[in-house]
Amino acid sequence: MAAKKILVVEDEPDIRKLVHYNLAQERFQVVEAEDGEEALKMLQREKPQLVILDLMLPGMSGLELCRSLRARPETARLPILMLTAKAGEADRVVGLEMGADDYLTKPFSPRELVARVKAILRRSEASFAAAGAEVYEKGPLKINFSTYEIFVRGKAVRLTLKEFELLRFLVQNPGRVLSRDQLLDRVWGGEVFVDSRTVDVHIRRLRKAIEKNDRKPEWVLTVRGVGYKFDEKALEK
Ligand code: CA
């Protein structure tokens, strides 16, 4: 398995080097950025699996960067560990509310940092459940589960987050008949104002986005009276 890539966003060179060194010791691949602007470029280019983000940065603050990452679909779920010199409870809460996954106060021990990074990565992997691979590629369909990119016959396709989650669950269960209730549970779990018609509406949109002819779907099939099924074999045709 390829080494996990981590982006360290920190303006203080000493801390950046310290973090870099300790992560590299644990066989992580590390890339660095000095400020928010550079971080955004690195994110696009390097596609890291986790970001270590200092709160106090010149220019765009760590919080602003965190908020903007959460607002973009491609980085909405990217794990973020925030670093700060401030030990105040208020800062901790703000950081977590802005969408950071965890929080570490300076000075921190490198061992603690590495332990937190591993814990966050474990959690984020678990949330991808049985996903296993980060990329699904079969015939004309290619999905990158970590960047949320989808290509159908080489063309980029845009889906909403729910449509994407729906597709993910279908693709992860090829050939299995999935009931509307199962899909509701998995994709909308916990949300109150949805019913099984919501599933049908989203399936229709998903088919429009990916099927050659959404009136005669070949990949996302209807199983009358039950639900839906992803026909993986049809991708090989
Ligand atoms: Ca700083």
Image (cartoon, rainbow, N blue to C red):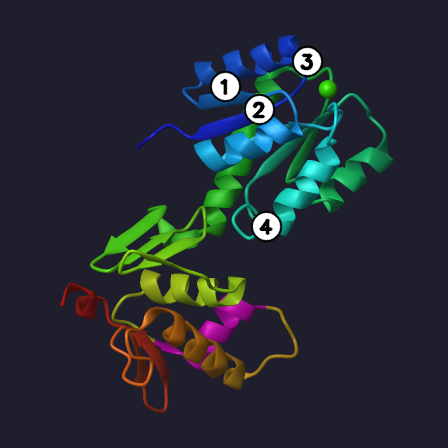
**Magenta portion: prevailing SS class:** helix
Distance CA(mark 2)–CA(mark 3): 11 Å
Q: Which residues are magenta?
A: 178-189
Which residue is disc 2 drawn over?
Answer: 8
Rendered location of residue 80, percent (x, y): 61, 36
Which residue is disc 3 drawn over?
Answer: 12
Q: Nearer the viewer, mark 4 or mark 2?
A: 4
Residue drawn at (64%, 40%) of the image: 101
The residue closer to the viewer here, 168 or 210, is 210
Q: Which amino acid lies under the numbered mark 2 shown in the image of this protein?
A: Val
Residue drawn at (53%, 15%) of the image: 20
Q: Earlier in the sequence, mark 4 or mark 2?
A: 2
CB-based contact (under 8 Å), mark 4 and mark 3: no
Distance CA(mark 1)–CA(mark 4): 27 Å
Residue drawn at (86%, 37%) of the image: 90
Distance CA(mark 1)–CA(mark 2): 10 Å
Q: Earlier in the sequence, mark 1 or mark 4?
A: 1
Which residue is disc 4 drawn over?
Answer: 72
User: Would the CB of label 3 be found within 8 Å of ligand 1?
Assistant: yes
Q: Which amino acid lies under the numbered mark 4 shown in the image of this protein?
A: Arg
Distance CA(mark 3)–CA(mark 1): 17 Å
- Crowding at mark 1 (Cα within 10 Å: few <14, some 14-19, many 20+): many
Rendered location of residue 141, percent (x, y): 28, 59
